[in-house]
Image (spheres, rainbow, N blue to C red):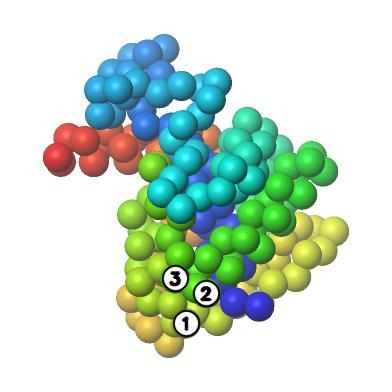
């Protein structure tokens, strides 16, 4: 099964990148693009080619991100991840999302979620460059993802670190990234 780790990474990225701005309570401007964000309807989870089910799964994961935990091992040619949730509903959403996003990556169908990390672009552009093994166990979703393409390997490592940061700090790193992107224009 290809691209399941990418799916986890994509899912976590989309999950934790769930909105286009920073809460005013964090002493930042509200909305990197000046439009603000809505924590009730979460429009940032929608995309040009994302289904309502995909957005709903992301919402479940986003609203319950504190139930998620993650381990990443960087390999010479990729990554090994273990992602889990203490909440069965969140785990179900995660597994469903992983399967769906894996198919998208294999097909090169970028969901174009408004808030997804630009690190993911290379995965959709280079379909077939990633070999993935996945196993759902009591420990969580265990994924090994490798590539012969050094740029893909670098992107896998970078994105795995992004996702791990989001799992540790919630929305903060997403807001930081989006603010930085807005400043760079």
Label 1, residues with CA under 10 Å away: few <14, some 14-19, many ≥20: some
Q: Is residue 36 something that shows in the picture?
A: yes
In the shown orientation, is residue 111 left or right of residue 8? left
Tell me the number on the disc at residue 106: 2
Q: What element does badge 3 sit on? A: loop
Q: What element does badge 2 sit on? A: helix
Q: Quadrant of residue 180?
A: top left
Q: Are marks 2 and 3 in contact (CB under 8 Å)?
A: yes
Q: Which residue occupies 66% across, 37% down?
A: 60
Q: Are marks 2 and 1 in contact (CB under 8 Å)?
A: yes
Tell me the number on the disc at residue 108: 3
- In the orientation shown, which residue stands out farthest toward the right? 138
Label 3, residues with CA under 10 Å away: few <14, some 14-19, many ≥20: some
Nearest-to-viewer mark from 3 and 1? 3
Q: Is residue 76 something that shows in the picture?
A: no
Question: Gap between marks 2 and 1, in whole Å?
Answer: 6 Å
| Percent of width and height locating residue 103 | 58, 69
- In the orientation shown, which residue stands out farthest toward the left? 185
Tell me the number on the disc at residue 128: 1
| Percent of width and height locating residue 90 | 73, 42
Tell me the number on the disc at residue 155: none
Residue 161 vertical placement versus 125 (above, below): above
Query: Split into 4 quadrants, where in the image is the C terminus?
Result: top left
From the viewer's side, name the closer residue of 176 and 19. 19
């Amino acid at each position: 099964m290809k691209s399941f780790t990418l799916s986890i990474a994509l899912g976590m990225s989309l999950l934790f990148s769930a909105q286009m701005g920073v809460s005013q309570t964090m002493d930042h401007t509200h909305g990197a693009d000046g439009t603000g964000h809505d924590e009730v309807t979460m429009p940032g989870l929608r995309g040009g080619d994302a289904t309502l089910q995909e957005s709903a799964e992301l919402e479940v994961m986003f609203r319950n991100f504190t139930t998620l935990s993650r381990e990443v091992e960087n390999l010479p040619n990729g990554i090994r991840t273990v992602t889990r949730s203490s909440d069965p509903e969140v785990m179900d959403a995660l597994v469903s999302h992983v399967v769906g996003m894996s198919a998208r990556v294999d097909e090169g169908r970028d969901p174009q979620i408004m808030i997804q990390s630009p690190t993911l672009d290379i995965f959709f552009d280079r379909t077939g460059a990633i070999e993935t093994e996945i196993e759902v166990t009591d420990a969580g979703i265990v994924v090994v993802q490798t590539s012969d393409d050094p740029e893909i390997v670098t992107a896998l490592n970078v994105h795995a670190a992004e996702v791990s940061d989001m799992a540790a700090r919630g929305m903060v790193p997403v807001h930081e990234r989006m603010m930085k992107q807005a400043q760079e224009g």
